[in-house]
Image (cartoon, rainbow, N blue to C red):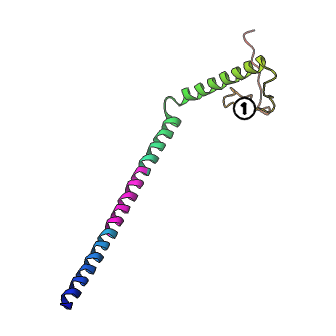
Amino acid sequence: MTGDTDDIIALRAALAAAEARAQVAELRATDAEARAASAEAQIAHLKHLIARMRQDRFGASSERGRRLLAQLELELEELETTLAEDAPENAVNPAVRATAPRSNRGRQPLRADLPRERVGVGT
């Protein structure tokens, strides 16, 4: 009878070990699937960011976006100026206030060392 009891105990131990190995394998598979899904999501996210950056840089609306940004900056400056004029005691010192530098300053003057030639209009 002790032989049967020992066999039962050994079988139960073997079953528990097999179940533990199956759980470990399942966890590893789940972990691998989660990592693969995470990597795929990250790849998709990066591709989306690259596409948006290309669109912002090379798209037809990139120039319009710059002009719109410049226009909004001008409106903001006008509103701040109006607010400062209306309430001088609450105004921020313009020397302290940091504004974004303008990116579009128009045509720059030619270098001084370039040769110059004056051409008259019909004499």
The answer to which of 55 and 2 lies nearer the viewer is: 2
Position of residue 52 measured from the top left corner of the image (x, y, whole percent): 48, 39
Q: Residue furthest bottom?
A: 2
Q: Secondary structure at mark 1?
A: loop
Q: Residue at x 35, y 59 (%)?
A: 33
The answer to which of 97 and 68 lies nearer the viewer is: 97
Q: Quadrant of residue 18?
A: bottom left
The answer to which of 50 and 123 lies nearer the viewer is: 50
Mark 1, Cα crowd under 10 Å, few <14 / some 14-19 / many 20+, is few
Residue 35 magenta-drawn?
yes
Q: Residue at x 25, y 79 (%)?
A: 12
Q: Residue at x 81, y 31 (%)?
A: 95
Residue 121 magenta-drawn?
no
Position of residue 48 measured from the top left corner of the image (x, y, whole percent): 44, 43
Task: Please give left or right for residue 49 compared with residue 2 in the image.
Answer: right
Position of residue 56 measured from the top left corner of the image (x, y, whole percent): 52, 35
Type of residue at label 1? Thr
Position of residue 77 measured from the top left corner of the image (x, y, whole percent): 70, 24
Please say if 63 is above or below 44: above
Residue beneath label 1, please?
A: 99
Q: Quadrant of residue 80?
A: top right
Q: Residue furthest front?
A: 1
Task: Please give left or right for residue 13 compared with residue 88 in the image.
Answer: left
Secondary structure character of the magenta stretch overall: helix
Q: Quadrant of residue 31?
A: bottom left
Q: Residue at x 73, y 20 (%)?
A: 83
The answer to which of 22 and 50 lies nearer the viewer is: 22
Q: Total of numbered circles in the picture?
A: 1
Task: Please give left or right for residue 9 compared with residue 45 in the image.
Answer: left
Magenta-tinted stretch: 25-41
Q: Quadrant of the C terminus?
A: top right
